[in-house]
Amino acid sequence: MTADAPAPSSRLDLRGRRFLVTGGAQGIGAEIVSRLSAQGAGGVVLDLAESTADAPWPAFRVDVTDEGQVSAAVATAVDEGGPFDGVVAAAGIVPSWHSPEDVDLALFDKTMAVNVRGFVVTVKAVAGSLPPGATVVAIGSLNSWRGDPNLLAYAASKHAVLGAMRSMAMALGPKGIRVNGIAPGPVATDALRHRMADRAVRTGDSPEEALEAAARMTSLRRLATPGDIADVALFLSSDLSSAVTGQLIPVDGGLL
């Protein structure tokens, strides 16, 4: 390290910075808010779910697919607290299993709307006011680059998130704004356990057996946690990743 290079700890210091986190009231999004807040950042949450009473940031009850709602919430937040220095688009849904011949097109449209349109709407609302050095982080998936015979709608949406993220990185890079994504594998959340329970009817495995089987597929023999995802979101939102943009970083325990 050169004499004038800042220590790594100082490059994680987010004091004085403001972030907008969609889907930040629960699950992975809430864990990301906690990480950013612990490093001194302030911010705002957009979510249809209600935040817990001890949530560190104020929240707006917003449907991220509705451009009017998102734009109004962002305008209010900027008026009250100033421009944002970063965005984390964590709002998303995972539909129930379906095959190509029985896919519910209404569910397909909803999945695309929340996962893709919601990301684009959010960035559109803030991009014009983001300063040089700002960051955007999207939550993609391993299904951003591979298919799934039971999740056509989800895989299609996450492929689209990857394309949108890379296009944003190219467009905003000359302004000094970095855009990256995180590709979780199966993450040990309550939502995953509920999905495993729903799928048990088809597979015959209990949710516990399904989770254990998923863990055995990884190199580390464990599933990623929301904290693992939040750590990478913190890295991508901090100065430690100052030369990283247009990248989708897997956080999957080593699904190789």
Image: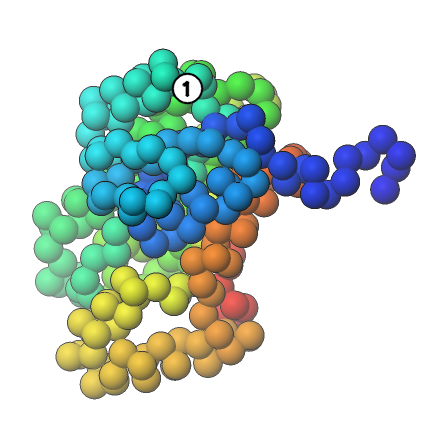
Name the amino acid type tagged 1. Gly
Residue at point 59%, 25% (across, down): 133
Residue 205 position, x and y percent, is 25, 84
The answer to whether 136 appears left or right of 109 in the picture is right
Residue 9: image location, x then y, percent: 70, 43
Q: Quadrant of residue 77?
A: top left
Give the residue at x 10% y 55%. 104
Q: Position of residue 35 (x, y in %)?
A: 50, 46
Q: Residue furthest top?
A: 79
Asked where in the image residue 53 lies, by quadrant, the reply is top left
Q: Nearer the viewer, residue 244 or 75?
A: 75
Q: Is residue 216 left or right of residue 76?
A: right
Looking at the rendered image, the quarter that the N terminus falls into is top right
Q: Is residue 115 above or below residue 192?
A: above
Q: Which residue is mark 1?
A: 81
In depth, the one of 173 and 205 nearer the eye is 205
- Residue 37 location in percent, x, y? 49, 40
Q: Nearer the viewer, residue 92 or 225?
A: 225
